[in-house]
Amino acid sequence: MKKALITGITGQDGSYLTEFLLGKGYQVHGIIRRASTFNTDRIDAIYADPHEQGTRLFLHYGDLSDATGIRRIIGKVQPDEVYNLGAQSHVRVSFDQPEYTADVVATGTLRLLDAVRDFIAETHKPVRLYQAGSSEMFGAANPPQNEGTPFYPRSPYAASKVAAHWYAINYREAQGIFICNGILFNHESPRRGETFVTRKVTRAVGRIKLFLQDKLYLGNLESKRDWGYAGDYVEAMWLMLQQDKPDDYVIATGESYSVKDLLEEAFRYVDLDWRDYVEIDPRYFRPTEVNHLHGDATKAREKLGWEPKVGFVELVHMMVDHDLELARQDKTLRDAGHILTPRGLANR
Ligand code: NAP
Ligand code: F7E
């Protein structure tokens, strides 16, 4: 049985990847951060008590800022494949916490690579590693962007991902480790964090439709993104590690839409006009914006046989359907006298 170790297992992608790998028969180990509240919501449905026979999902406390802990986990798990998904992944927040972002995203990757390097040297086990790169690395580069497009990062997050990308290439070339950089364009799902724009919009649509919220505050509505479905994208991560040779791949849908297009589709789906509800709050603007991301995933299609299955409209509808159901549950609780999230918190 192959063993996979995932950093960032509690995140959107970590949860989809875990389900995917369990479906492929893997034993899956994930690194979780200690928090004062439970942070395993996204994997709770698939987590079984480790004392039960036949369990194939195991969680370990660790943090990308803690090299000794990471090394201990790798030694204990002895993974065949490592997926580095852990990150402070919010671009806007990275302007407020640049040093922390760099520590986790850039240096954290270096810590992991170095731990894997020493583990391979000691055990001669041919570990393969996936590094979660981002279309944010292209930043201000003209669209469409592919593997040959020069990087032009526009945030501390993006600059940290560029550093991690090059660390990964250096460990591949200097240490001969099988490492792949996935350069993934935005991918979303009903499990997307609620402060990213797609989920913020679909969550608000559900709540506005059921009269739980009356306004949605956003930043730049003009920027364009190539939005795909996270469930499709984790398959690409796995495919990269199954090839004969390690390489880097852009993963994208090849279609690009503006935040306004997103609003149009999400509100129209529930027969509302977004102009009646959306207001601009400059606090959501970024000091340096990435205006237009539009990926060209020809290489992934030709070499990995990977193609996205879910398109933009289907993705938006899937997320709105999910968030309408959440809003219905919220409403039931409110009608029963429970206190719901205050409106201020809903507009983070
Ligand atoms: P996400 O939902 O924000 O999940 C991030 C994960 O990283 C969470 O499990 C989080 O743990 C964990 N994490 C945060 N700080 C950590 C630390 N110091 N040590 C260890 N783990 C830490 O992100 P995602 O959307 O799943 O994205 C997965 C990866 O792909 C990230 O590296 C992201 O930067 C990258 N990426 C994402 C996209 C996208 O559109 N989703 C596109 C390109 C690249 P908690 O749950 O405890 O916070
Ligand atoms: O912003 C605009 C915002 O935060 C998308 C991360 O997963 O994908 C993600 O980064 C656009 C930007 O995603 C609001 O200015 C307007 O132009 O959903 P987002 P992102 O910054 O593209 C990349 C590929 C990653 O790697 C990252 O980890 O939407 N926007 N108004 C807003 N964005 C947010 N969050 N909130 C607003 O109110």
Image (cartoon, grey):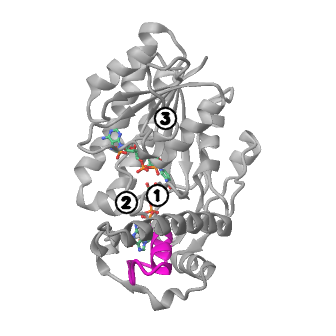
Counting labels gives 3
Displayed quadrant of residue 293: bottom right
Question: Which image quarter has ligand 2?
Answer: bottom left
Quarter holding the C terminus is: bottom left
* Extreme residue toward the top, this view: 123
Whether residue 89 sits left or right of residue 294 in the image: it is: left
Q: Are marks 3 and 1 in contact (CB under 8 Å)?
A: no
- Coordinates of residue 59 in the picture (x, y in percent): 40, 28
Can the viewer see residue 142 in this picture? no
Whether residue 149 sits left or right of residue 330 in the image: it is: right
What's the CA distance linking mark 2 and mark 1? Answer: 9 Å
Provide the residue designation for mark 2.
91
Picture layout, residue 7 above or below residue 147? above
* Extreme residue toward the front, this view: 336
Q: Which mark is residue 169?
A: 3
Quarter holding the N terminus is: top right
Can the viewer see residue 153 in this picture? yes
Q: Is residue 144 magenta?
A: no
User: Residue at 68% across / 30% down in the picture?
Assistant: 243
Picture layout, residue 43 above or below residue 91? above
Provide the residue designation for mark 1.
136
Q: Which residue type carries mark 2? A: Val
Mark 3 or mark 1: which comes first in sequence? 1
Helix, strand or loop at disc 2? Answer: helix
Label 3 Cα neighbours within 10 Å, binned few <14 / some 14-19 / many ≥20: many
Can you tell which of label 2 and label 3 is closer to the viewer? 2
Label 2 Cα neighbours within 10 Å, binned few <14 / some 14-19 / many ≥20: many
What's the CA distance linking mark 2 and mark 3? Answer: 23 Å
User: What stretch of residues is rendered in magenta?
Assistant: 200-223
Q: Are marks 2 and 1 in contact (CB under 8 Å)?
A: yes
**Label 2 beta carbon within 8 A of ligand 2:** yes
**Label 1 beta carbon within 8 A of ligand 2:** yes
